[in-house]
Image: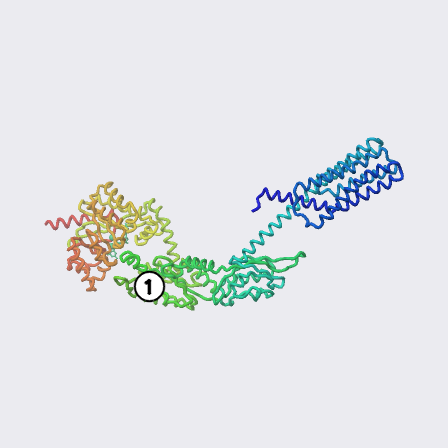
Amino acid sequence: MLGAPSVSEELRSRVRASQISMVLRYTSWMMAANIANALAVVAVAWPGDNRWLALSWSVPVMAVASIVMFKLFLGDRRTPRTSASLNVIRRATTNALVMGALWAILPLGYVIASPQEKLVIICVSAGMLCGAGFALSTIPSAAITFVSSIALGIVVGLWFAPSVATTVISIMSVVYIGVIVTSSLTLARLLSDRILADINSTEQRDVIGLLLNDFEENASDWLWVVDKSFSITHVSARFGEITGHPEQHYMGRKIGDCLPLCDRQDLTEHEAAGLEALTRAMAARKPFRNCAIAVKLKERKHIWAISAKPVFDEKGSFAGYRGVGRDVTQEHESKAHIAYMARTDALTNLPNRALFRENIEHALARHHRHGENFAVLLLDLDHFKIINDTQGHPEGDRLLVEVAKRLMCEVRDIDTVARLGGDEFAIVLSAIERPQEAANLAESIARTITRPYMLTHSEAIIGVSIGIAVVPDDGLDADQLIRHADLALYRAKADGRGGYHFFETALDEAARRRHQLENDMRGGMERGEFELYFQPVVAADSRIVNGFEALMRWQHPALGQLSPAEFIPLAEETGFIKQLGAWAIRKACEVAITWPPHIRVAVNLSAVQFRTPGLFADVQKALAATGLAPDRLELEVTESLLLDTNSAVESTLLALRHLGVRLALDDFGTGYASLSYLRRFRFDKIKIDRSFVREIESDHECQAIVEMLIQLAGNLNMSLTAEGVETEGQLAVLLSRGCKEIQGFLISRPTTSATLFQFFEIEDQSRLLAAG
Ligand code: C2E
Ligand code: CA
Ligand code: CA
């Protein structure tokens, strides 16, 4: 490795060598001029008195010049030097001093010279001053020594013969020195600059050469060069190795014929684009970078990234391309794999939401191009969460994989089945003639999905709800189609699970209404638009009131009285249920404290309230603030709460029970695997859903179930209430089966708290009757 100091020493020695060689170029001429000038001086002086003086001066001059010439003649056989030590320069300077001293003697003879001799002395001295100064100029020290000596001789010589002319000549000699010294110094600097640049560029060439060699021998990349007719003039051996031909095989062939390109029909969009970009760039003589082209090597597709720059000759006309190529197959494969992973659901290998959206975009493009209609179906599994929670996630996953398989069997190759997440699936049904085709598919899917699933330890049955949006009627952009299919799905679910629904504009209306209610809710609460109604719960035989169930109403300023069935789910979705529920508990306690002390109040709680912290505190605060005895408060929860395996739910229930409030299981019989929950948690009461009561007169099975539940409740030491009793006939059957407590329109619809006094009166009358 060349260190910086030695570089500058090497540089200096090289600079010196070329200084010397420049001087040596003129030296023989210069020496010849020395001899000729000395002879001229002798010739002019010969006729006069100064003949011997001239001769004795000229002999040493000619002798020195001859020796120098002789040495030079010998030196010519040596190879030119590439470096020169400082001594060489010193020697040259000494030589210049010797010659300069000899020539300085000549003008000293000016005083004694004849006019003719004077002329020759001035001419020859000036000539030597300028000529030698020029010849030596690349070695400033030599040039300066030489011209200073002569100039000194001139000035001193003319000093003894003062006149206007000699003064002028003396001044001019000094000016000449100045000119020669400055130009000599400048020349020397230019010379060293040029040599430095030379050295640098040679070094750079060496390094690039080394790198290229290394590259050609070791790298996986290869270099290629083509001429202006795109025929190969150079290609790395590496290219030959990859393609299985020696590199000579390619010399002179057109580059287009040398690339083992894949057939057009085997190219992906991206690969076709790469080839096109490369062809286009080459046709335009433009540089290009990393154009990915697909080639076939040993029956396998490889991807090459090609980069190149056009080359232009001195006249600026195109002279070919110089470039590199690289096999990037592996990089491409891993990139493609990552892209695939990002667009695929890992569990089912179905496209995910992102790819599903892309597929809708593609279908929309086909619609615009060919008028092809299609449908978007969004699917939501019913009861999946229960299986996931009760059987464990691995079983849930197995079920989802099976659902994915069944869905794939339902569609054609041109359709897309995607999993959007959780238990949501989606389908793009391509190329349909009528919306009915989507309905047919939905029906067929519903049949397939509801077939039992074999899990590890059990069999499971699930349902599916489907929302459908059809192009072009239901939208012409992906987001809108998904939104509309989603609204249809929402509707399908609300209609009772297991069905499908097409999007219709009324759904949009309903969605807008939901949206409005969500927005109005908080303000409505502040404005006191919410109210509790109460429905009596009475003894089945005596119809004596045991308590009241608090049922919420919303007096909406624009939409009138709204049912909790409409706004409670919204409040649950937005989380507003926390405030709303706390308010209901508090309000119910406030009202109940005004009733006779044995009358209870029942408040409905939503499962969401259990999942948000603070429920227990709300209950505790309401009781403390109103002074209501805890056992007069009954909290109604539904089975869906118990599906939640979350232990926080269970501990809240236990804490509430500990506080002394009563717990009732509401809507019993509508849920899933109901009986098992009764064992898991002890309730004070179960409330049989009104769907059983509705059928009880006509349906014997219903009667049997109700009878069994009544017995079961008795055995488990729970009370039981039959809900939704509307007719005397229903009441009679319930009574005959041993039902103790009922609730329903037969007794009373829910009413405002202000009208409840009538029930107390009836109760008092009944009591009196019973006592009598
Ligand atoms: P639910 O707890 O099952 O309440 C009984 C529902 O049945 C009430 O509907 C009531 O008006 C109705 N009903 C009572 N007797 C009869 C009858 O003989 N025939 C018929 N057809 N219906 C009868 P409502 O008031 O519309 O409440 C609907 C649901 O909203 C309630 O069902 C309850 O789940 C929920 N809800 C009501 N208030 C609240 C509340 O404050 N908090 C929570 N989380 N949910 C509430
Ligand atoms: Ca209830
Ligand atoms: Ca109920």
Seen at 69% across and 49% down, the residue is 78
Q: Looking at the image, which is closer to me, 399 or 178?
A: 178
Q: Is residue 333 above or below residue 551?
A: below
Q: Where is residue 368 in the image (x, y as percent from the top left)?
A: 48, 64
448 or 69, which is in the foreground?
69
Count neighbours of disc 1 (C-alpha within 10 A) and say few if under 14, some if 14 to 19, many if 20 or more: some
Q: How many discs mark residues in the rendered view?
A: 1
Q: Where is residue 122 in the image (x, y as percent from the top left)?
A: 83, 38
Residue 757 seen from this side:
no
Residue at horizontal 30%, vertical 52%?
Answer: 564
Q: Is residue 153 left or right of residue 298?
A: right
List x then y, in percent, for residue 580. Answer: 30, 47
Q: Is mark 1 on a helix, strand or loop?
A: helix
Name the quarter showing ligand 3.
Answer: bottom left
The disc labelled 1 sits on which kind of residue?
Glu
Relative depth, front residue between 143 and 174? 143
What kind of colouring is applied to the model shown? rainbow
The picture places residue 259, in percent across and down from the top left corner, at 54, 65
Left or right: where 156 falls relative to 764 = right
258 displayed left or right of 452: right
Residue at the left extreme, as displayed: 772
Residue position marked by numbered label 1 in the rendering? 402
Q: In this view, does 478 lie above or below 7?
A: below
